[in-house]
Image: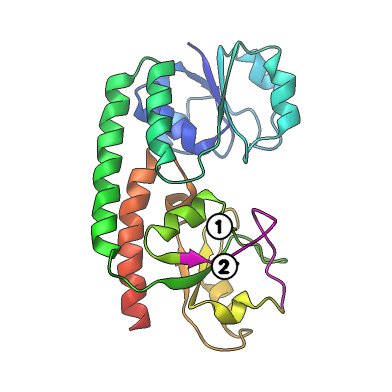
């Protein structure tokens, strides 16, 4: 097998399944596991793939994602790569299907079963820890100028919901809506979360935003990888979310 991956979190999953020696191409955003992934040639970004460079690696399998990669790029590659693996996890437990399917496709059923057990343990621990917490309304920001947030149809929102953190807006026609200056979400939110990706929010952004809010409220910087990456990082993400919820409760109290 010669696997090209255009999805950062799934590149990491391939290595977690002991398939690192089979990975022949990745994007520049595929940065984990940091030491091992350096030997794999980069073929552009998730949205701007260098098709010729990718095909030069002679992949037998191509791993893509509906949200992260362009449909026209996949259509171009479909005629030249024997196996296209299309993914689109929308809720945390979709990771269990992801592990199972990758285990089947790449003959790593034992390794996939270990990940599934670890995931279930972390998920159940989160549920126990947050079962009695008060539901909070959250504005989760992923970009600025303009401010982009996430709809409840996204993986991020579904994961936060596991800790009784309900993202705003409650309904949206877009998966990644813009929070305009007069959006009621600014006032309705109990707290605001600034993600470290895709926009690299820092404390200066939190401080600047705080000065513009109509009323004071907590603004926290959060690890975007932990809250948006599926695959094996979702296991650490569940544990991170447990600690984040505890931190939020202490901050609000």
Q: Which residues are magenta?
A: 166-181
Residue 113 placement (x, y as % from top left): 28, 28
242 over 62 or under it: above or below: below
Please report the residue visible at 67 percent of the width from the left and 21 percent of the height from the top.
Answer: 53
Please report the residue visible at 59 percent of the width from the left and 36 percent of the height from the top.
Answer: 28
Mark 2 / mark 1, whichever is N-terminal: 1
247 over 25 or under it: above or below: below
- How many numbered tags mark residues here? 2
Please report the residue visible at 42 percent of the width from the left and 27 percent of the height from the top.
Answer: 14
Please report the residue visible at 59 percent of the width from the left and 82 percent of the height from the top.
Answer: 187
Q: CA distance from mark 2 to mark 1?
A: 8 Å
Residue ID for mark 2: 168
Q: Which mark is residue 152?
A: 1
Residue 9 placement, left or right of 119: right
User: Helix or strand or loop: what does disc 2 sit on?
Assistant: loop
Residue 190 inside the magenta-drawn segment: no
Considering the image in quadrants, where does the C terminus appear?
Answer: bottom left
128 over 47 or under it: above or below: below
Q: Residues within 10 Å of mark 1 (few under 14, many from 20)?
A: many
């Amino acid at each position: 097998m010669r696997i090209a991956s255009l999805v950062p979190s799934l590149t990491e999953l391939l290595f977690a399944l002991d398939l690192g020696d089979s990975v022949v191409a990745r994007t520049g955003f595929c940065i984990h596991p940091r030491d091992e992934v350096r030997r794999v040639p980069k073929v552009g970004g998730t949205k701007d793939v260098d098709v010729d460079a990718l095909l030069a690696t002679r992949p037998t399998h191509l791993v893509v994602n509906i949200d992260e990669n362009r449909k026209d790029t996949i259509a171009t590659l479909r005629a030249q790569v024997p196996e296209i693996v299309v993914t689109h996890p929308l809720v945390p437990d979709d990771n269990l299907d992801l592990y199972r399917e990758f285990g089947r496709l790449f003959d790593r059923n034992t390794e996939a079963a270990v990940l599934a057990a670890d995931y279930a343990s972390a998920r159940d621990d989160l549920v126990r820890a947050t079962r009695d917490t008060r539901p909070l309304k959250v504005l989760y920001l992923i970009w600025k100028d303009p401010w982009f947030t996430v709809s409840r149809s996204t993986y991020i929102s579904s994961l936060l919901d596991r800790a009784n953190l309900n993202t705003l807006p409650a309904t949206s026609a877009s998966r990644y809506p813009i929070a305009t200056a007069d959006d009621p979400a600014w006032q309705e939110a109990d707290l605001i979360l600034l993600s470290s990706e895709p926009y690299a929010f820092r404390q200066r952004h939190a401080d600047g935003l705080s000065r513009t809010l109509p009323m004071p409220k907590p603004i926290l910087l959060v690890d975007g990888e932990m809250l948006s990456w599926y695959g094996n990082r979702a296991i650490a993400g569940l544990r991170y979310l447990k600690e984040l919820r505890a931190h939020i409760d202490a901050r609000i109290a």
